[in-house]
Image (cartoon, rainbow, N blue to C red):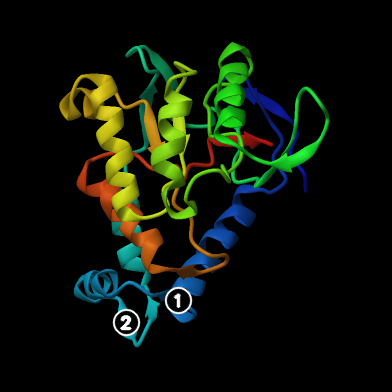
Amino acid sequence: MINTSSTEHGTNVFKMFTEDQIQEIFYATFDVMRTVGFKILHGDARKMLKKAGAIVKDDSVKVPEHIVRECLRQAPKGWTIFDRTGKRAMEVTGRKSYFGTSTAAPNTMDAYTGEVRETLLDDIGNGAKIADALSNIDFVMPFGSSQDVPGDACDIFEFPVVVSNTTKPIVFIGYSGRGVELVYEMAAAVAGGLDSLQERPFVMAYPEPIAPMVYPDHVIDRLFAAADLKMHHRGSRNLRHFQ
């Protein structure tokens, strides 16, 4: 049975499932994590999970329900993201949704000539400037993946271009744990120090696993870097992308 639509926090909500159906999906997820598990390629992460009670065999990790529930219990129920000037920008909690630009396209259509060509740092700067001027855009990611800088260091070239052209919150791609650290160092310099950045964060890292359940070394390194610095990473259903 499909429930009627409603509106919460200014966001349109259309419920496709009953509460019982949602609970069935919830418990099925626990079963998948317990019986199928994940492929964790990071040795230190496997050690941490084993110490917590997960079942580890080679790079396969099966996570019992009680571990997941404890993680959910300790996880924050939401947080506040600020803009570059220190003003509140996004309350990432509940059913609130925010919209922003997306990233990673190696090619772009030149805004002046219509030519499809490789994405350059200048394009990312122009994209950030446009996103900054659009009232319906809440956060900014680099508009594409720049091809005129070394591929494994795009993060440390792209962040200065974006932060120079927008005051809005920034979600950045990190290509390594060290890259994430360096971006946060730059963000801390903009914010007036790491303490100020942690108090009023305006940047979020964007680490993602390989769908559906594979976690490479470099992804976990990026997660660890953000966690060690007590910073947020983008993994929330509250953030939506336009590309």
Image quadrant where residue 58 sits: bottom left
Q: Residue 68 vs residue 74: left or right?
A: right
At 28% from the left and 75% from the top, the residue drawn is 43
Image quadrant where residue 21 sits: bottom right
Q: Which of 90 and 189 is in front in this view?
A: 189
Q: Which of 224 and 144 is in front in this view?
A: 144
Q: Residue 179 vs residue 130: left or right?
A: left
Residue 161 % position (x, y): 46, 27
Q: Split into 4 quadrants, where in the image is the C terminus?
A: top right
- Name which of mark 1 and mark 2 comes first in the sequence: 1
- Residue 37's label in the rendered image is 1
Circle count: 2
- Residue 55's label in the rendered image is 2
Q: What residue type is labelled 2?
A: Ile
Q: Is residue 74 shown to the viewer in this render?
A: no
Q: Is residue 236 shown to the viewer in this render?
A: yes
- Residue 210's label in the rendered image is none
At 40% from the left and 29% from the top, the residue drawn is 160
Q: Which of 73 and 58 is in front in this view?
A: 58
Looking at this rendering, what residue extends furthest in the right direction? Answer: 114
At 37% from the left and 25% from the top, the residue drawn is 202
